[in-house]
Amino acid sequence: MKTEIKRLYVLLCGYEVLPKTISTRNNGDRFILAEPVCAYLLETTEHVILLDTGIDPGYANDPSLRQEHFLNHGWSPPVVRPCHLLEGQLAAIGIAIADIDHVILSHLHFDHCASLDRFPKAKISVQRKEYDWAFSAAPGPGYLPRDYDHGSLNWNLVDGDWRPLPGLDLLDTRGHTEGHQSAVVHLPSGRTILLPFDAGDLAENFDGPVLPGQACDDEAALGSILRLKLVQTGLNAEMLLFHDPNAIQHIDLAPAFYD
């Protein structure tokens, strides 16, 4: 397959401390997981694309933000160390925030869309259903408008499956949220990488299959898991799990890359 993708970098942006049932419905309520939060950088022949933007380090390290958005709700704050900061990881591969001209978001939960105001000149792509839900009066837990409600952003709203450029396909995987999308990256070596984001957090979600803990539509969420399993098999793709604390230890992290 023709591809304009040159390299894929995996950026580890911090951790969330969560009951396992957040990821696996009704399974593991006695277990607490430290789940990684990632972003993915694509170098292409003409563009620098960021898939998700990580988590705002302020939620981990600013006492007022920790209190307001986590402790007041009985949630554990995330963990973001200096080594997890996006700017430092990008600098290590010779890229600045200003070089990113396209941001594609899997969805608008706070651990996927940190501080979008850092990208005022970039095109910001998201599913239209996700945008409409996130900007509704009461989108619910996980949506923190301070991350994404910035009037100057260049929003690009899409509907269903779409292809931003040869070698990158976005798949409508509604279920976890109203407008969740996953990604398929075709690399120049012929290798194919499948990025499910939150359609399934852990290997267990796909092995079961097991529903995610949070879903706007259980039937759609199960359908998305099954669809991604078929895509993985059909393309002989390698799946890089977004939130799996075991899998992250075996993923090549930036400045290493996949090509």
Image (spheres, rainbow, N blue to C red):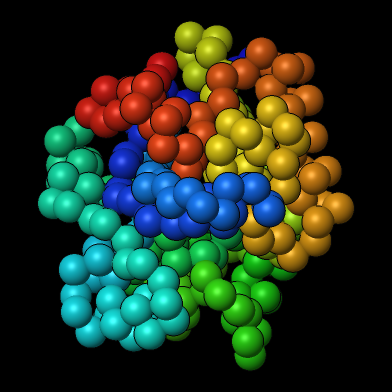
Residue drawn at x 38%, y 55% is: 16
- The percent position of residue 255, horizontal first and vertical second, equals 23, 28
The quarter holding residue 256 reads top left
The answer to whether residue 229 is left or right of residue 48 is right
**Quadrant (top left, top right, bottom left, bottom right) of the N terminus:** top right
Q: Most extreme residue toward the top, as rendered?
A: 189
Residue drawn at x 62%, y 34% is: 204
Q: Measured along the vertical axis of the image, is residue 23 above or below residue 8?
A: below
- The percent position of residue 220, horizontal first and vertical second, equals 82, 52
* Residue placed most toward the observer, 10 or 29: 29
How many marks on residues? 0
**Quadrant (top left, top right, bottom left, bottom right) of the C terminus:** top left
Residue 79 visible in the picture: yes
Q: Measured along the vertical axis of the image, is residue 21 above or below residue 253?
A: below
Residue drawn at x 44%, y 28% is: 247
Residue 183 visible in the picture: no
The quarter holding residue 139 reads bottom right
The answer to whether residue 48 is left or right of residue 157 is left
Residue drawn at x 76%, y 17% is: 234
Q: Measured along the vertical axis of the image, is residue 39 above or below residue 103?
A: above
- The percent position of residue 61, horizontal first and vertical second, equals 19, 68
Q: Most extreme residue toward the front, as rendered?
A: 30
- The percent position of residue 200, horizontal first and vertical second, equals 63, 42
Q: Most extreme residue toward the right, as rendered?
A: 219
The answer to whether residue 202 is left or right of residue 8 is right
